[in-house]
Image (cartoon, grey):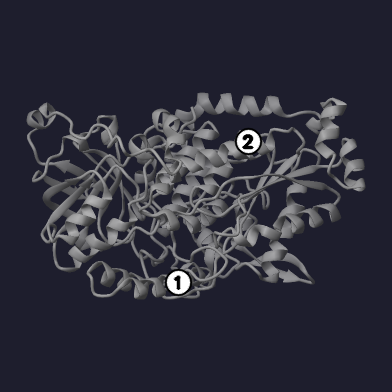
Amino acid sequence: MAVHPVLAEVTRRIAERSADRREEYLGRIRDARTEGPVRGGMGCANLAHGFAACGVQDKLWLRGDVTPNIAIVSSYNDMLSAHQPLKDYPDVLKAAIRRAGGTAQFAGGVPAMCDGITQGRAGMELSLFSRDVVAMATAVALSHDMFDGMLLLGVCDKIVPGLVIGALSFGHLPAVLVPAGPMASGLPNAEKAKVRKRYAAGEIGRDELLAAEAASYHSPGTCTFYGTANSNQLLMEVMGLHLPGASFVPPGTDLREGLTAAAGRRVLQITDLADEYTPVGEMLDERAFANAIVALLATGGSTNHTLHLPAMAAAAGIELTWDDFDELSQVTPMLTQLYPSGTADINHFHAAGGTAFLIGELIDAGLLHEDARTVGGATLAEYRKVPRLDGGRVVWEDGPAATGDPAVLRPVAEPFDTHGGLRTVRGNLGRAVVKVSAVRPEHRAVEAPARVFESQERLQDAFAAGELDRDVVAVVRLQGPRADGMPELHRLITPLGVLQDRGHKVALVTDGRLSGASGAVPAAIHASPEAAAGGPLARVRDGDVVRLDADKGLLEVLVPDEEFAAREPEGGVPDPDRGWGTGRELFAAFRAAVGPAERGAGVFR
């Protein structure tokens, strides 16, 4: 199937604008490649330190130059449900690798924080920067020059992008990401959303709200809504970093353990000591990132990936822009209805045909580069297959030819929408991203007076005081990466949703982020340039009429240009009491160095 002309053109432009940096990056990782394992050039004391804790057999193998040694880097902790299943993975992986003739060492752990826990708390201001900490921790783990490949264990929001960025700094090595899988479905998402709104409206108390939340988030595994964590998993599979069909197999099952062991065997086959050398830095090219954007758009995935994909791409010498997302959105059909865009969760998606059906449909429509390289085989065509156990080992067979549930997953010929789930809006308030997949068409255009806030707490107070019971565009500024680390403002969705349900025209405009579970209120987020960097949100005043039209791509304040330009910025610096305490002071250097949202809001060059 020929590649869709828009996908071909966008990919060509990505490659063209990235040519110099990409060539510099490829030259760097090719220079890092050695004849045989790099540890072969170590001094004897260095190497002895590297295998001192190993068993006798592994020591013998690591002395030589023919046995591949694999680094395991994990985000395991037993507080977070998504990461708790990773506890036993290193032992499973080491056993599988040893049986296949290799060795593996647990090279290091990386931090994993949960936005679900830190929502609305001071710790959320560390969240986005934790991605770059994970990247650095991954690089530290790999820095010992003991390894011929890597297995990266992680699931949620900032962890997976951080692992990929860190891995790309050692791009001459192959990398396989090993997921944990989702928890079983709990309280239906629609019921949970109703309970949250009732609590926000003062109709129920904390006990009832907590009971509903605990029935939703209830066991080991990834949260089941289609937020950033599950968007991560889907994108890693489409980018070829997972084994085919690995993303959404539940933890604690025989198939999950079989896939984990298979990842260990597979990474041996793609090292420089085997016949299918697949360095991650070469594999993740402009085709892989274009494929990721399409998959995100086709599924209404997390807005956080308008930050993470550019940041990951930059680590490989590739420049993505929001225009790439926007142009591909015009030709990418919406093929899923998953919460918050619908009521189904990721388990329903998996049961309806999951990634195999989705990838097959997009390939057949020319909307994915089928020839992109992967860890699972020569091309992305291998990812049309699904795994099953045969005699205790994983084998792959042809995936479903039809959807198992058209209310959840549809073919390209019968999409939920002809456009993708994300839009870019622009105007005299800068540029921003809108997740339209969760917003009904009649709510996508709002023109109303602004009410300006400089924290989400002040908006919540105004809502509780009845000050927002009208048509309103809530402008929440000083929430960008330079101001306070760009926290998620997910708690704003419920009160604004209550106002929308009352029949008011409501929208949110902010230089902050929203959760991957962004809801039904139209929200222009990641506004760039941010207010703390002199962006136009700093010149908006209470009562200014703001127009947000996601379908037309507009974000503007209806104030004469000369008057608006002449205004002095307000709130150009954060509250001096913000940014200190609860670890936030440790990230002052990150806030000073961070780049703009459109470039991924990262701290690296």
For mark 1, what is the residue? 214
**Tag 1: amino acid:** Ala
Query: Mark 1 and mark 2: span between their CA atoms?
Result: 36 Å
**Image quarter for residue 469?**
bottom left
N-term-proximal mark, 1 vs 2: 2
Crowding near the residue tagged with mark 2, few <14, some 14–19, many ≥20 C-alpha atoms within 10 Å = many
For mark 2, what is the residue? 139
Does residue 593 appear left or right of residue 524 in this picture?
right
**Tag 2: amino acid:** Ala
**Where is 366 relative to 38, above or below?**
below
Does residue 221 appear left or right of residue 580 in this picture?
right
Marking on residue 236: none
Does residue 140 appear left or right of residue 80 in this picture?
right
The residue sitting at 46% across, 43% down in the picture is 308
**Quick check: can you spot residue 531?**
yes
For mark 2, give the secondary structure: helix
Does residue 129 appear left or right of residue 549 in this picture?
right
Instruction: Return the residue nearer the eye: 318 or 329.
Output: 318
For mark 1, give the secondary structure: helix
**Where is 398 relative to 274, above or below?**
below
Instruction: Return the residue nearer the eye: 206 or 481.
Output: 206
Residue 252: x and y in percent read 65, 69
Residue 120: x and y in percent read 35, 53
**Where is 288 relative to 224, above or below?**
above
Crowding near the residue tagged with mark 1, few <14, some 14–19, many ≥20 C-alpha atoms within 10 Å = few
**Image quarter for residue 327?**
top left
**Image quarter for residue 584?**
top left
Residue 356: x and y in percent read 56, 63
Residue 588: x and y in percent read 42, 32
